[in-house]
Amino acid sequence: LASASPSPVKKRKMSKEEIILIASFQNLVDKQHEAEEDVRFTRSSIDSLAVAPGGGEDGLWQTVRLWQSFIDQRLVARQNEMQREFQEKLLEFLKKEKGISEKELPSAIGF
């Protein structure tokens, strides 16, 4: 199968600040991958980071939306992590402090 060629994008000269922003983002992505973060930007997102002024397809507002999505995903991941930790502590408490056996626990608690 022949791969579809990307649509031609009008290249424009980037400002020094835009270049710095892209380099900082690349550094962040590299660190996220080195740390094996659960929620992280893909390496391919570096090339598509939108930094141009305005709200178009290559505009900075696209990047703002990308960050919002990233923050939302991190929040959900942390909430799930906290829920798991709470469930583990609840099970431990019920078994050790209250003397309840695994068989006595409701299925909703026996994760």
Image (spheres, grey):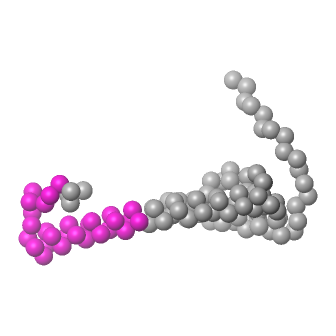
Q: Position of residue 89 (x, y in %)?
A: 25, 71
Residue lying farthest to the right in this orientation: 13
Quarter residue 99 falls in = bottom left
Left or right of 49? Residue 90 is left
Give the percent coordinates (x, y) of residue 54.
80, 61
Does 111 sit left or right of 31 as displayed? left
Is residue 102 at least partly visible in the picture? no
Does the magenta portion include 15? no
Q: Split into 4 quadrants, where in the image is the C terminus?
A: bottom left
Magenta residue span: 79-107
Specify whether residue 100 is painted magenta. yes
Judged from this view, the residue extending furthest toward the top is 1
Q: Which residue corresponds to the image point at 72% horizontal and 30% vertical from the top-left?
A: 3
Tell which of 55 and 45 is nearer to you: 55
The reply, left or right, for residue 43 in relation to residue 99 is right
Question: Could you tell me residue 41's position as x and y percent?
Answer: 61, 57
* Quadrant in which the N terminus is drawn: top right
Q: Is residue 66 visible?
A: yes
Q: Nearer the viewer, residue 109 or 37?
A: 109
Seen at 62% across and 53% down, the residue is 42
Task: Give the main secondary structure, helix, strand or loop, of the magenta stretch.
Answer: helix
| Count of numbered marks | 0
The answer to which quarter of the image holds residue 109 is: bottom left
Foreground: 53 or 40?
Answer: 53
Question: Who's the residue at 26% across and 66% down the image?
Answer: 88
